[in-house]
Amino acid sequence: MKPGKEELALAIDVAEWGWLRVHLERDGLILISSDMDLAEAGWRIAIDDTPVISGWIESGKVGKPSVAQIAKWDEDKGKQFQMLIVSPYILIQDKALNIQ
């Protein structure tokens, strides 16, 4: 059974780049644009909504991190991201974290 969007929203967490890098090396990281709803993106990926996901990829809203982004993040291993596990992927979002 696929998780619902509400269930995924509750599973969003925070992770440091140093912890996430191993998933990059296994080609498991997907970067989600900071102006998108991370739970929505995760749900669309979980249900394999190919038309929507393809549109996001084409528009640059969803994709693999660039070499320049990776190099910048490697300089700050403590940099924090919002993250969501949608197996086999780890979705990450580089945005200001509003966690108290």
Image (cartoon, rainbow, N blue to C red):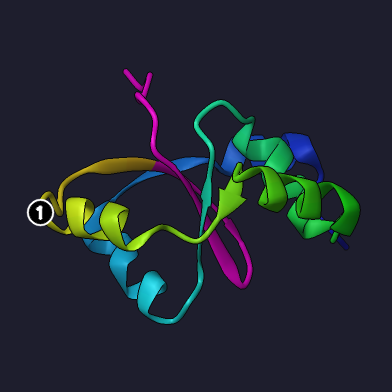
Estimate the x, y position of residue 2 in percent, counting from the top left: 84, 58
Residue 46 vs 87, above or below: the answer is: above
Estimate the x, y position of residue 98 in percent, counting from the top left: 38, 19
Residue 24 vs 61, above or below: the answer is: below
Q: Nearer the viewer, residue 100 or 95?
A: 95
Answer whether residue 64 is magenta in the image. no
Estimate the x, y position of residue 99 in percent, counting from the top left: 36, 22
Q: Residue at x 84, y 61 (%)?
A: 48
Q: Residue at x 38, y 58 (%)?
A: 66
Q: Nearer the viewer, residue 16 or 35?
A: 35
Estimate the x, y position of residue 5 in percent, counting from the top left: 77, 39
Q: Residue furthest left?
A: 75
Answer whether residue 96 is magenta in the image. yes
Q: Quadrant of the C terminus?
A: top left
Part of the protein shown in magenta: 82-100
Residue 37 vs 31, above or below: the answer is: above
- Number of numbered discs overlaid on the protein picture: 1
**Residue beneath label 1, please?**
75
Q: As drawn, is 85 to the left or to the right of 43? A: left
Q: Residue at x 27, y 56 (%)?
A: 68
Q: Residue furthest bottom?
A: 26
Q: Amino acid at mark 1?
A: Glu
Q: Quadrant of residue 50?
A: bottom right
Q: As drawn, is 15 to the left or to the right of 49? A: left
Categorize mark 1 by other alpha carbons within 10 Å: few (<14), some (14-19), many (20+). few
| Label 1: which secondary element | loop
Q: Quadrant of the N terminus?
A: bottom right
Q: Residue at x 30, y 67 (%)?
A: 21
Q: As drawn, is 78 to the left or to the right of 1? A: left
Q: Nearer the viewer, residue 36 or 69?
A: 69
